Image: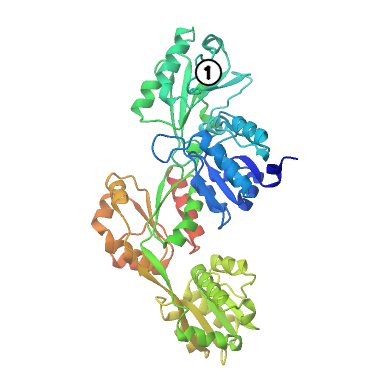
Amino acid sequence: MNEMSKKGKVYLVGAGPGRVDLITVRGLELLKTGDCVIYDKLVNAGLLKYARPDAELIATPKRAGDESFTQQQINKLFLEKAKEGKTIVRLKGGDPYIFGRGAEEAVFLAEAGIDFEVVPGVTAAISAGTYAGIAITDRNFASEAIFVTGHEAEGKQQTGIDWQLLARFSGTIVFYMGMGNLKFITTRLIENGMSADTSAAVVADATLPTQRTAKATLATIADRCEKQKIGAPALIFIGPTARGDARLDWLSRTPLFGKTIVITRDAHGNAAFAPKIAGKLAVPIELPVSKIKDLTDSSAFIEVMAEIHSYNWIILTSPNGVEVLFSALAKLNKDARVFGQAKIACIGSQTAAKLSYFGLKADFIPAEFTSKDLAKGLIESINLKGQKILLLRSQLAADDLPQLLAQAGATVAHVPIYTHEKNICDLKAFSEMLAEKHVDWLTFGSPFAATCFFEQVPVDFVKTGNAKIASIGPVTSKKLADLGVKVDIEPAEHTIDGLLSAIEEYERQTK
């Protein structure tokens, strides 16, 4: 056996057409375990968050410029990383063997004696058609399909495209990588006998919230794309099915498709919220107007940790608080056993879900996710007289919760474990979008986020942009009202998921 085959293995993985969750289960499984990830330009960067934290990530764009990689350089990477004994995940857009040079890479690996596996992916043509309401095959219109490259290999002396065959073809023709040659492609087909009135369509940014479609005839599709400013990456569809069918256009009926939603949490919170928005086929714009400051190095926190087992109840009010707490416990070489017999109450299902991630189940969650409702629920269900309660939450939290609990007879200790600070962020791109009325929603998850945002963006400027305002709950809505901002929606469930669902329902009713 070749010595190289013992050193490492390469997985040629189809990353799918663009949308993160359209990668295969097998592909995602490998991505989570690979030592090294080598990825192409068209791979959605959102996939990289699934890689191991210690994985080596190498971008290999094939374009002009100093950062461009040749195929020879990529092959050299395979040799180097395999020799180091690494498991290499080679992420390629779409499917590795559909105009992705995957076969060339597989041949190189075979000849080099490097073990490899090929994981198919959803190819761009299939997904672009599905997302644009174009059935590539339809027994009433097209019983066959052809995939063609619109960009042949450099230095190739003779074309491998049979233009006469394509011009006579009665099914669906899909051109990959052809936008730079769109006028040439349509002209060649017409010159070889295809009717200038043949239906044609171009789908750009397929499966993404920014997807756009242009439809016209073979003779006019290039001009239509120019007018709509549609360029690469895009797929070109030619044939009877390219006209599409309005009944198949499920994407345009999706309530949030293409809507621009601005999120104003801290960077960590924005990163968690953005995929949920993208999953609804909307466009998330992340503005981290605040940042979290850990306060668990305080003497008050260290002291309370030494006696935490003596409390009857521990109250956690946010997912941020849960993360900060368990991070601090890890630094102290402790875990959930420090809670002893104490019961845990959480404000909201998301806080409880974060707690369950660390292996603990919340003993009490109020029906309404506010501090007042938490206090009311505990008071109604438990005799709090003489009970010791520990609040581990934000320094900026209001005093109503500890006051209500104390009035009910509890002994309450409040130890701030984190706070939020204002974060100055670059607002140039956002301001331009707002001025051009390209922002559909502004979302606020806390009173502090609202304060930080409007300290950087004038209220009057926001009003001129016609963006709608979504507030996570009554306390945040009051702060917005105090700032002179009209709230358009406030969800019944005061969580990020509830906020997004309320926006979706609003758009569904007004669509």
* Left or right: residue 116 compared with residue 19: right
**In the foreground, 245 or 87:** 87
Q: Position of residue 418 (x, y in %)?
A: 44, 75
Q: Residue furthest bottom?
A: 386
For this orientation, the residue located farthest to the right is 1
Q: Is residue 484 in sight in this rendering? A: no
Which amino acid, mark 1? Gly
Q: Label 1: how many residues lie within 10 Å, few (<14), some (14-19) or many (20+)?
A: many
Residue 44 can be seen in this image: yes
Give the residue at x 42% y 76%.
397
Q: Is residue 329 above or below residue 73?
A: below
State the count of labels: 1
Q: Quadrant of residue 313?
A: bottom right
The chosen color scheme is rainbow
Between residue 105 and residue 217, name the one nearer to us: 105
The residue pinned by badge 1 equals 239
Residue 6, percent across and down?
Answer: 71, 46
Q: Secondary structure at mark 1?
A: loop
Q: Quadrant of residue 122?
A: top right
User: What residue appears at the point 44 percent right and 58 percent down from the top-left corner?
Assistant: 270
Q: Is residue 457 above or below residue 61?
A: below
Horizontal and vertical percent for residue 197?
45, 13
**Would you place residue 239 above or below residue 79 in this image?**
above
**The N terminus appears in which quarter of the rendering?**
top right
Q: Is residue 511 left or right of residue 378?
A: left
Quadrant of the image containing the C terminus: top left
Judged left or right of residue 233, residue 355 is right
Image coordinates for residue 234, horizontal then vertical, percent: 46, 30
Work out whether residue 377 or residue 358 is closer to the camera in this orientation and state it: 358
